């Protein structure tokens, strides 16, 4: 079977979907038996993952983004069919709106945030999501959902047949398991993720402002600036007491940064999966996470769950964990056990079974 994977997220400056696509393709190629894994654009060698830039050359990135732009806006012209090799299955990520029509179609469901929280998205994002649902998700023979929560949301909000949707969890990169902590002058609490409204960083800053922990710990905020982040960025720029904003952190530095944290805090309002949380579990770090969407599914009983809209509850959870070495050890052990369920090799093997079923 020839499986053609939409690798266009690797052209973009992004985080979660790009990380997923990179590791997923890498492990599909490693685990494939009789299957042939092809990509659009064609990947000759996977360069190092960098969220700030494309893994392709500048010229190739520009030409392929131009093609994608035209293909998404000129559905009458089968531009992607003309530019891709023959395949039995074409698997869409989240950028292609008019996939080839001559092959079986499958796709990945990441989240339903545009449907659930339209106020946290730009009009352009919402239009793109509607196009994806109409032209790809509704027509696909099979869909991979990255969590049960995402699958349930898709059935409820899009009216999709649940029998067409298979839940296959993403993995955590091997480097997080047993990662060595990065040296730090002071112990720190860590948030890692894009700065945007859905990630709810302001609630964490509110919780930290009233915490006595600022005397002994820093709150480290790491991640690139996202859309509609002016208010949060202004707060970070004012250098509040006990807060350090690192901005974008290169991929190869994330395991050490994560492993060095006294606690990892993730107050997101909605996640399709929540890969930073799974990475923190794998690094043996106590986790405080939101009690909404897919996050309880990811953490199981290996984290303290809080209402993300309550700074007081976030603050109380921080106080509780950092005051109790025994609770920290309990969360570390539970987290390592839980993270073992999220491995990329297993994800790739289950994905290949999915393609055999729906291809």
Image (cartoon, grey):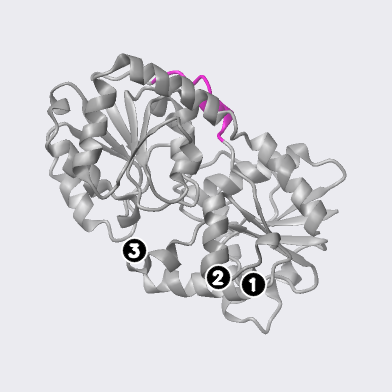
Looking at marks 1 and 2 on the same chain, the residue that comes earlier in the sequence is marked by: 1
Which mark is on residue 120? 3
Taking the image as shown, residue 359 lies to the left or right of residue 345, namely: right
Q: Marks 1 and 2, Cα distance to the nearest angstrom?
A: 8 Å
In the displayed structure, would residue 89 be above or below residue 339? Answer: below
Residue plotted at (14% across, 32% down): 211
Residue 144 seen in render: yes
Crowdedness near tag 1: few (<14), some (14–19) or many (≥20) residues, C-alpha within 10 Å: some
Report the magenta residues as a range: 172-181
Which residue occupies the foreground of this view, 247 or 235?
235
Q: Nearer the viewer, mark 1 or mark 3?
A: 1
Looking at the rendered structure, the secondary structure element under dot 2 is helix
Residue plotted at (79% across, 42% down): 32
* Count of numbered circles in the view: 3
Residue matched to label 2: 158
Spot occupied by residue 231 in the image (x, y as percentages of width and height) = 19, 56
Spot occupied by residue 19 in the image (x, y as percentages of width and height) = 53, 45
Q: Marks 2 and 3, Cα distance to the nearest angstrom?
A: 19 Å
Crowdedness near tag 2: few (<14), some (14–19) or many (≥20) residues, C-alpha within 10 Å: some
Which mark is on residue 138? 1
Residue 13 counted in the magenta span: no
């Amino acid at each position: 079977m020839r499986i053609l994977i939409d690798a266009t997220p690797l052209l973009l400056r992004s985080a979660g979907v790009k990380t997923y696509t990179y590791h997923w393709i890498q492990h599909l190629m490693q685990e494939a038996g009789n299957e042939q894994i092809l990509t659009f654009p064609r990947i000759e060698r996977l360069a190092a993952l960098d969220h700030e830039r494309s893994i392709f050359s500048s010229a190739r990135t520009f030409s392929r983004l131009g093609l994608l732009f035209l293909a998404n806006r000129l559905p009458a012209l089968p531009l992607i069919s003309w530019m891709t090799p023959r395949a039995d299955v074409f698997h869409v990520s989240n950028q292609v709106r008019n996939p080839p029509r001559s092959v079986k179609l499958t796709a990945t469901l990441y989240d339903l945030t545009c449907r659930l929280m339209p106020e946290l998205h730009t009009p352009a994002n919402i239009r793109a999501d509607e196009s994806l649902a109409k032209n790809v998700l509704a027509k696909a023979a099979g869909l991979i959902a990255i969590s049960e929560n995402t699958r349930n949301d898709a059935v409820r909000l899009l009216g999709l047949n649940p029998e067409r949707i298979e839940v296959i969890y993403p993995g955590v990169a091997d480097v997080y398991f047993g990662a060595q902590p990065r040296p730090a002058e002071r112990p720190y609490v860590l948030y890692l993720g894009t700065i945007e409204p859905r990630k709810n960083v302001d609630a964490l800053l509110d919780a930290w402002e009233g915490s006595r922990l600022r005397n002994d710990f820093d709150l480290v905020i790491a991640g690139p600036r996202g859309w509609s982040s002016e208010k949060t960025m202004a707060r970070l720029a004012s250098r509040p007491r006990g807060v350090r904003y690192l901005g974008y952190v290169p991929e190869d530095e994330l395991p050490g940064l994560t492993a060095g944290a006294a606690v990892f805090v993730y107050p997101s309002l909605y996640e399709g999966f929540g890969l930073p949380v799974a990475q923190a579990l794998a690094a043996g770090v106590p986790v405080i996470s939101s009690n909404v969407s897919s996050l309880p599914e990811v953490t199981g009983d290996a984290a303290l769950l809080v209402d993300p809209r309550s700074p007081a509850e976030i603050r109380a959870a921080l106080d509780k964990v950092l005051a109790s070495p025994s609770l920290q050890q309990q969360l570390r052990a539970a987290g390592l056990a839980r993270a073992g369920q999220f491995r990329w090799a297993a994800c790739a093997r289950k994905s290949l079974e999915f393609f055999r079923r729906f291809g």
